[in-house]
Amino acid sequence: MKYLFLPGNSKNNKDWINKLSEEFSGPKSVIHYDHWETGEDNIDFNIELEKISQLKNSDEYVVVAKSAGCVLALMIEKEKILNIKEFFFIGFPMSYIQNRKIDIEELLRTNKPITFVQKMKDPQIGFEDLKKEISNIKPNTNFVLYHKEGEPDDNHYYEDTGYLYNLCSS
């Protein structure tokens, strides 16, 4: 089994995804998006899918993704690019998905387990609203509330990588 780490859209996620990946032992791949270097504002899913298709498909992957990386992860599954065992989604980007008119119901048609880790008032979608919307599409999904003393519950930053590791490994 191998871990695949997919960050959020912004280049600000680069250090965070590297730090999060260091919490996990074992083989892993950490993706850094091309648009971070080219100066484009948004991820080009086709470029990133092509890059990820170069990874070994014979390996079994656990995907740990944040925000736009969650969408990329579901696209990888839909296209059967990798053999994915399980997904952990941090800060699911429902507003991002709706603004781009991405068909989330189609992407969530997978029998693979998904755990959503979300803050109570994440501006992309709050924990309770996420639970309600996703449960209607994909029953039997796991939801974990991210709450850390000293961290605000009303932003899209999930700062404590050790805490995230514990949530994803329990």
Image (cartoon, rainbow, N blue to C red):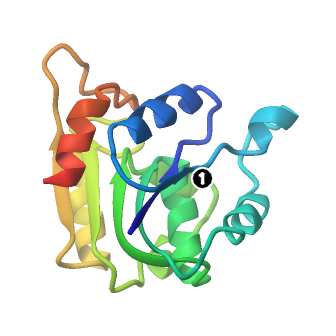
- Residue 138 against residue 120 in the figure, above or below: below
Quadrant housing residue 52: bottom right
Provide residue 26's location: percent of width, then percent of height.
37, 53
- Residue 129 against residue 8 in the figure, above or below: below
Quadrant housing residue 126: top left
- As helix, strand or loop, the secondary structure at mark 1 comes to helix
Three-letter residue code for mark 1: Asn
- Residue named by callout 1: 99
Please indicate, yes or no, whether residue 128 appears anywhere in the rendered image. Answer: no
Residue at the location (33% across, 45% down)?
24
Residue at the location (79% across, 60% down)?
47
- Residue 156 against residue 111 in the figure, above or below: above
Residue at the location (25% across, 20% down)?
152
Query: Between 58 and 126, which is closer to the camera in this rendering?
Result: 58
Q: State left or right for residue 111 relative to residue 21.
A: left
The residue furthest front is: 26
The residue furthest right is: 38
Residue at the location (81% across, 34% down)?
37
Q: State left or right for residue 8 relative to residue 151.
A: right
Please indicate, yes or no, whether residue 15 appears anywhere in the rendered image. Answer: yes
Query: Between 80 and 130, which is closer to the camera in this rendering?
Result: 80
Provide residue 150's location: percent of width, then percent of height.
18, 13
Q: State left or right for residue 21 relative to residue 143.
A: right
Count numbered badges in the picture: 1
Query: Between 8 and 161, which is closer to the camera in this rendering?
Result: 161
Provide residue 160's location: percent of width, then percent of height.
28, 26
